[in-house]
Each structure stands twice: as structure tokens, then as C-alpha cells.
Amino acid sequence: MAATSRIPYTSQAEVLDPVTMRVEGDIPSWLNGQLVRIGPGLFEFGEFEAALPMDGMGLLHAFNIQDGGVTFKSRFVSSDILKKNSEAKRFVCAEFGTPVSPDPSKGRFAKLKSMIKGDAELSDNVNHNICYWKEADVLLAIGLPMFVLDPVTLEHRMKVTLPESLGVDIVSEHVHIDKDGCLYLLGSHVRGRPSYHVVRVPPKGDVMSSFAAAELVFTVPGQYKVTPTSHHTFFMTENFFVIIECPLEINVLKILTKGTIQEALKWDPSVTCKFHVFNRRTGRPIPQKIESDSFLLMHSSNAYEYGDHLVLDMFNLRDLEFKDWFVPRKTMAQPNFDPTAAGSSSKESPPLRFVIPTNEDKITKADKGANLVKLESEQAEAVKQSSSLLRLRSRPLCAGDGLQFPCINTAVTGKPYSFLYAGGYGESKCLEFAIGKFDVKTKEMTSWEAEKKQFLSEPVFVANPAGSSEDDGVLLVSLLDYATEKDRLMF
Ligand SMILES: [Fe+2]
């Protein structure tokens, strides 16, 4: 494995034996446990390099906090593709933006064929998200197949997938776990007419049996007949699921000819976003079409029901040039990389709140042109365009732009809440390199600013178990410091 560097998006070595970290200040006595994160950690095989940061091989990081002390360890996800690439010294499958490397042992035509098709069917690399599934006492590294990991050692236990009969080809990176322990995934069917499915995986004690018992609970036919759209997350509340179809198409045939998903994407901001709302209680979708101006949904910060309304808070990309979405890894993995100069116009994307009326009787009886959002002081609108169409207008959720990676106190997930935490990673006017705390009711913001050449992770809020207020807890943020070569986990 490569030598470890502090510069972001450079290859890292595994740290299998826990390293004791130096502690400055006091760690709260109630804070004990393990913080596990995942990200891309290996970008080169032989002479070939990953084109995008997101194409690196998945590396797990764990900070174990016990009785005021902290240890750190890391371990690569035991994917088949990591083994195959390492043995072949090249990328034998395409990643999102990295094509198959040519095979030097093959002739010219065979080389071309291997570049287009890949030697294996699909990469099983996972590097974006993990979740702890308490009912099965496992960590899941999210993908299809799903990696099942030991929550303490991070060691590989098994890979599981969904039953073939469900027709799910890929799953979105973010999932939900309900109060009853059921795991919910958003699956896409991309072979043939595209469709999108909320999949329920019931807790059965062991993960293999759970995934074998998975079932579809909500299905949405895709708006395009041939090309599926890209999905990163979806919303779940006590009584509703919401799938948002954004106009980012994936031309599956182009993946074969162009070699990567990145080159097969088509962003069309002139097409509206479609909100598909499923009532879990009645077992039916809301019959009206629900649309808004275009955006690309990235992350949900919270979603809850309030009276006859569904409140959806989210972090999106919009109003941006498609070419700016993917900054090459080589550009980013530089000690002097300046994200503000990289051209991303996601600066124009504040976190947004949408509100959807859910009382079908009131929707039916309302006049054309009426705003059906009846929450006091709420500026988000849902205007009845016709008997079959509602048009949503969002409002900025808080004073922030270009922010990423929201988190909240999980005790208020699915409920009205006050505090939202998020990071600025160089693309935000309000928080350049900083972590912010936003009051979504008063719009007040407080922040912690990083120094130059400090690279922040996404924040994770851990509530004080004896706390009585929503913001009583600590925010965990790891920090790569490539000026001083001292990495930190901050509280
Ligand atoms: Fe994400």
C-alpha cells in the first residue's frame, strides 16, 4: 500500500494496530464508543490513477473513545475489486469517472475491448457511506452488494445482496432505519424500463436471512423510458416515503461505449423535479403530480410531519455548470488546491425547505392557484396548478450557501427541530472552511473556522445522554492538517 500523506485525496496506508492519540483538553466522561467513517483511500494501481476523488478504494477509519482516551485505526474494505486491481496493477473495472486501464498483456484490439468492457462485470468498491444496524450488530458499507463488517474490528464478515426477484440493480448511498429496526433502501431498476423502489429489509437476527426476506414497499416508474435518473437519498417519516426524481439521467448504453458513468450523465435543468409521495398508512401514493424547479438532491437533513404537511429539509446542488461538478483528483490532491478557484458554482445552493400538503381531501377541494401550505410564518409554498398538479416553491432553510454534509441530533430525526450542523468546504460564502451550527428557527449561525491547509470531515453530532436540550452534546469532526502534519479528531 502507498505511504500515508496528509494531503486530501492521496493514497493512505492501513493502520491495523490501534494508535493511541494525544488528547488535549477533556473528553466528556459520558462519551464512550467508536466513531467509524468511510472514504476513498487508495487511488493508484501500477502506473494508473483514479480520475476522481470518489473513485478511490473504500477505507474505513475508526476512532475508539474510552474513558477519556482515543485510539485510531483504519482498514480497507475487502472488496473483490481491490484484490483484482492490486494483482493486475491497473483498474480492471471502471469506477464512476475512471475507465478500465488498458491491459498491457493484450494485443491492440483486445486492449480496446478490455478498456470498454472491463475484465470483470462491475466494481464492488464502496466508499461513501456506512451505517450501524443495531438489530444485527453489524456495520453495513452501503452498496450492492452490501459489505457486512464487524462493528468493533471493522473486519469483513460477508457480502449480501437483495433477492434477484426484486429487480433492484443499484441502491442509493443513504438509507433509513425505522423504529422497529427495519432497514429501508432506495433501489433502482436500470435494466429495461427504469423504476425506483423503496425496499424494506426486516431484522431477522442474521443479515443473510434479513436480506433474503427483503421486499418492495413503494415503486415509482421512471419518467424516462430508457434512461434511469441518479438517486443519492430519499426521505422517510412516520407515515410517508418521498422519492425525488431529479433530471440527472444516466445513459446506460453510453457507459459501455464511453467507459465511465461520469461520461454517461446528462443534466437537464429545464426539466422539473418530481416528488413521489407514498402514504405508508393507506398504502397509496398521493395521486397528484408534485413538481418543483430543478435541483440535484444530495442529502436530507431532516423530514417530519406537521399537521397536514410534510416538511422536507435538504441540501442540494443547482444553478450550476455540469462541467464543474467533478473536479479531477489530481487537481484536488495538491497542497495548494483552492476549491474556490475550481469553478464550482454550487455557492448558489442554500439548504432548502420544501413543504408538501398531505390531506387529499383538502387538495381536491382547494381552488386552482391556491397555496396549500398553511403553516404559520412558512414561506415555502405548494400551489395547486390543476386538479392533478401541485407546484412546490422552496425557501432557504438557513443562512448558508454551498454547505454540505448536514447532521442533527438523531433524537429529533422525524420531528420539528431547531439545530442543524453542516460544513463549508471552500465553496461557501458564509462558511469557507468551517463547521457551522444553524438555528433553523431563528436563522442564527455560529461557526468554528479551520486554519489554512486544514481539511475537515463531515460533522457527527453525539447527544449527551443526560442532556435535556437538543444541542447538548458534542460535534465530532476529524481534521487533516497538512501544514503541520498533525491530524486531529475535534470535539
Ligand atoms: Fe452522501
Image: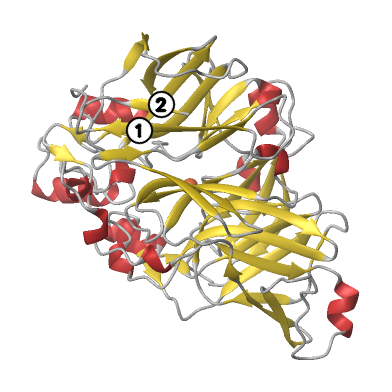
Amino acid type, callout 1: Leu
Question: Quick check: 299 left or right of 313?
Answer: left
471, 110: nearer the viewer: 471
Q: Residues within 10 Å of mark 2 (few under 14, many from 20)?
A: some
Q: Secondary structure at mark 1?
A: strand
Q: Mark 2 and 1 residues: CB-CB less than 8 Å, in contact?
A: yes
Q: Residue at x 60, y 71 (%)?
A: 395
Position of residue 357 measured from the top left corner of the image (x, y, whole percent): 78, 70
| Label 2 residue near ligand 1, CB within 8 Å | no
Q: Is residue 252 above or below residue 172?
A: below
108, 379: nearer the viewer: 379
| Mark 2 and mark 1: Cα distance apart in space | 6 Å
Of callouts 2 and 1, which one flags the residue occurring earlier in the amino acid sequence?
1
Residue 333 falls in which quadrant of the image? Answer: top left
Q: Which mark is residue 33?
A: none
Q: Could you tell me if residue 167 is visible in this image?
A: no
Amino acid type, callout 2: Leu
Q: Secondary structure at mark 2?
A: strand
Question: Quick check: 258 left or right of 419?
Answer: left
